[in-house]
Image (cartoon, rainbow, N blue to C red):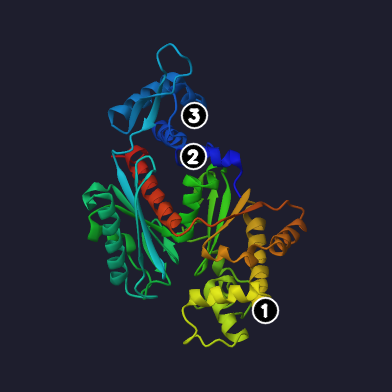
Amino acid sequence: MLSDETTEMLRSGCGPLLPTVTETRPLRQRLFECLRAAGASSRADLARWLDCSPASVTSVSAELIEAGLVREIDAPREAARGRPPVSLAVSPDIHKVAGIKLTDDTHTAVIIDFAGAIIAEATMPSAAHRQPLAATLDEAETLLHRALTEAGMVPGDLAWVGLGLPGVVDHAAGVALWSPLLTERNAPLREALETRLGLPVAVDNDANLLALAELWFGAGRSRTDFAVVTIENGVGMGLVLGNRVFRGGTGLGMELGHTKVQLDGALCRCGSRGCLEAYVADYALVREAQTALHWNRDTAGSARALLETLYAEAKAGHSAAMSIFNRAGRYLAVGLANVTELFDPHLIILSGGEMRFDFLYADAVLAEVQSLTSRTGRMPPKIEINAWGDMVWARGAAALALASLTERLLGESRP
């Protein structure tokens, strides 16, 4: 659970609270992002935070105020007399963005303002497990219009849209090389959705979106380096290094679920054998349950219903059901130990729908992670459990859109 101190820090603002060690971005962008993270700040505090002169802060903030991106607000009085101090804050209404998360169960969308506050949310069930790109984007567009209607807005009121889905996604190219939601490979997600909406779009793997959500709104705000491991329909990982999502040399890294834990092992939905998610993800647990408990998949109900029944059986002491979760927990411990050995993060956050099954993060599982890593002489990272619910993924997509918009407005490549 989060400490009271961390909870207090997260009540206002959005974005990383700690400075990046090596910073090359323009001062205007860094100042703006510091201000958005703080919620509101005086010019003097910004100068101390950014380690620059008050004159520089005054000059840059004047530029941002003139552009309408930042406004002056009265800070609370600290004394009964005297003129109240003036603080700066992001102008929330000047831009709005949307985030969309697609799954094979329930799609979610959120609209946020320029300061990161939620304006509207929407959900809808997914129509099919795997379908063509056009049909998937039909659902995304329908969902976005539901959120816009809830907010009393039209598409032209948005400045950017973020989109996330499971699979191997090339963020820079905007292409889904493979996704369990799509029948085709190398699907041009960004180009296709931009054509439909007439808006700029940023796309990414859903685990990266969850890492962004933690960095902007959650426990990761007070950490410069951490990993998020997601366990749902698959197993994903997002890695933050120096306040930025790390995607690997070609942008396709961090596929923890498809690292191999068993040669010639269980079949993964990607087509390979022995992947971690083939032992830990929901479809893997359902497959094991069908064999061990002699369930007929065609008559036993949905995968979610089967998992809930499996969990209830395990809680009641059914030895076969307990062994399925215990086996999955041991494989998860191996995966987390490998993350620790490779990246040495300060924190690993476990998240996703399967976190409702406490067997996967039982004391025995965490002890095994510690055992596997302490043998090399290193201290294991802190492990936290976050089960935010479905909407957090869409918030991560909105953060991706907000980051893209901020880079366009204030970065080196701004118009």
Query: What residue is at 54 percent from the left and 53 percent from the top?
Result: 239
Q: Secondary structure at mark 3?
A: helix
Q: Quadrant of residue 374?
A: bottom right
Judge whether residue 270 can be spotted in this image: no
Three-letter amino acid code of the residue under disc 3: Leu
Q: Nearer the viewer, residue 341 or 288?
A: 288
Cα–Cα span, label 2 and label 1: 43 Å
Q: Which badge, 2 or 1, comes first in the chain's sequence?
A: 2
The residue mark sitting in front, 1 or 3, is 1
- Does residue 294 appear left or right of residue 168 in this picture? right
Judge whether residue 414 can be spotted in this image: yes
Q: Position of residue 120 (x, y in %)?
A: 33, 51
- Does residue 400 appear left or right of residue 359 in this picture? left
Task: Residue under label 2, please give it.
Answer: 11
Q: Which badge, 3 or 2, comes first in the chain's sequence?
A: 2
Q: Nearer the viewer, residue 408 or 321?
A: 321
Q: Nearer the viewer, residue 222 or 262?
A: 222
Q: Position of residue 249 (x, y in %)?
A: 50, 56
Cα–Cα span, label 1 and label 3: 57 Å
Task: Residue under label 1, please give it.
Answer: 318
Q: Residues within 10 Å of mark 3 (few under 14, many from 20)?
A: some
- Does residue 366 appear left or right of residue 280 in this picture? right
Three-letter amino acid code of the residue under disc 1: His
Q: Which badge, 1 or 3, comes first in the chain's sequence?
A: 3
Three-letter amino acid code of the residue under disc 2: Arg
Q: Secondary structure at mark 1?
A: loop
Task: Residue under label 3, please give it.
Answer: 50
Q: Mark 3 and mark 1 in contact (Cβ < 8 Å)?
A: no
Q: Position of residue 322 (x, y in %)?
A: 67, 75
Q: Position of residue 50 (x, y in %)?
A: 49, 29
The residue mark sitting in front, 2 or 1, is 1
Vertical comparison of 292 with 333: above or below: below
